[in-house]
Image (tube, rainbow, N blue to C red):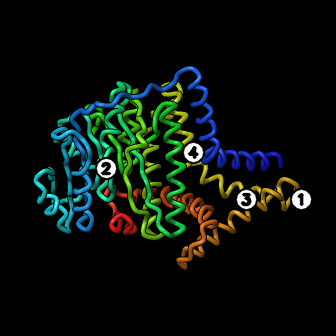
Amino acid sequence: MITIKVILFLSLFILFFSYLGYGIVVAAAVRLKRLFRRPKPLPDGYFPETTLVVAAYNEAGFIREKIANTLALDYPEGKLHILFITDGSTDGTDAIVGSYPSVRLMHEPARLGKTAALNRAMQQVQTPIVIFCDANTLLNDQAVKCIVRHYQDPRCGGVAGEKKVIAGEGGAENAEGIYWKYESLLKRLDAELFSVVGAAGELFSVRTELYRPVEKDVVLDDFIISLRICAEGYRIAYAPDAYAMESPSAGIGEEHKRKVRISAGGFQAISRLAGLLNFFRHPVLTFQYLGHRVLRWTLAPLSLPVALITNIWLVLAGYGGIYSILLAAQCVFYAAALTGWALAMRDIKFKPAYVPFYFVFMNVSIYEGFFRFIRKKQQAAWDKAVRAPTLQNS
């Protein structure tokens, strides 16, 4: 039974480290780093020419609000170039964008996916810095200034902005918001230790000269673009004061669709970023990549059923004490998750049940994403998740 005990505690350790322990270790490392070198504040007044690229697909219902928000960004006149690319849109998004003379439009009827659209848009970018953001988000008016100031550091190859989920009344929405708040804390720690481990497409930026065309079948373009820049020796800085606001998914079904896609893209990214698993070449970055991303997409989901099965095995074999306590805790956790699921299906909001539900929900989505990846069923062009109307009503 020693082997079963080892497997149980190893599974629990992997789960703990993936979701809490990694953050504790990085926080301790950052505190130690501050004893020897304090981060220097970046001066204001740095305003290089910058291009804001927005990929929009069938966003006719929101695109005017997006353009108004973009034109209201606070940046010196003539130094911010705005480019919208609407490839494949069939709802008149391109016509709406084309009616704004201060916005440059690129459009092709064919829909090849966001990655192909970004590759095509980058052929037209002439500024030293480019910022990407989603068409269904709104930026704070200081976002561009807050991003570009980080490029005063020559080691900075890119900048990750902040994603803010506008909380609604539902438990699922609040669970998504809690998750992103925790992710924001980890990004802040990661950036201070060395680099953000993969930017989110809602708002991120790169040095134009470091952009490399991405394969058209890539699902998580933002993740792969940013980490390939890190692989060249640069770091991705974090700008929490530059944020993109978006509504939560319009129901758990839409969030499920998004999570499965991200999970499938995560496994694809692992296969295409194999060089980042080399501790000897990228010691700190590899630790961050494994601890913050790879474990969550691989061993952590596997550890959930393994921990439960081995725990049941030991209790049935007559081992009580700590093993009975652990099994009882797991049963309570899964009962709460099941309760959260049942309430979600009835549109009943009970926040305490949504946190365990959302955790299990994320990990089940990873399994689905894995099988979609190995069957090569996830395409770069996909049916976007429907968002709640929070932003439109704000």
Of circles 2 and 1, the one toward us is 2
Instruction: Using residue 185 as the reference point, say whether residue 273 is left or right of it.
Output: left
Q: Which residue is mark 1?
A: 318
Q: CA distance from mark 4 to mark 2?
A: 27 Å
Q: Quadrant of residue 93?
A: bottom left
Q: CA distance from mark 4 to mark 1?
A: 32 Å
Q: CA distance from mark 2 to mark 3?
A: 43 Å
- List x then y, in percent, for residue 191: 47, 35
- List x then y, in percent, for residue 342: 60, 75
- Dot 4 or dot 1: first in sequence order is 4
- Dot 4 or dot 2: first in sequence order is 2
Of circles 4 and 2, the one toward us is 2
Numbered disc 1: secondary structure: loop
The amino acid pointed to by label 3 is: Ile
- List x then y, in percent, for residue 319: 88, 56
Local crowd size for mark 2, using a 10 Å CA cut-off: few (<14), some (14–19), many (≥20): many
Q: Which residue is mark 3?
A: 309
Q: CA distance from mark 2 to mark 1?
A: 56 Å
The amino acid pointed to by label 2 is: Cys
Numbered disc 4: secondary structure: helix
Q: Which residue is mark 4?
A: 295
Q: Which residue is mark 2?
A: 133
At 33% from the left edge and 27% from the top edge, which residue is drawn? 152
Q: Quadrant of residue 223?
A: top left
At 31% from the left edge and 54% from the top edge, which residue is drawn? 134
Residue farthest along the bottom direction in this orientation? 346
At 75% from the left edge and 47% from the top edge, which residue is drawn? 9
The amino acid pointed to by label 4 is: Leu
- Dot 3 or dot 4: first in sequence order is 4
Q: CA distance from mark 3 to mark 4?
A: 20 Å
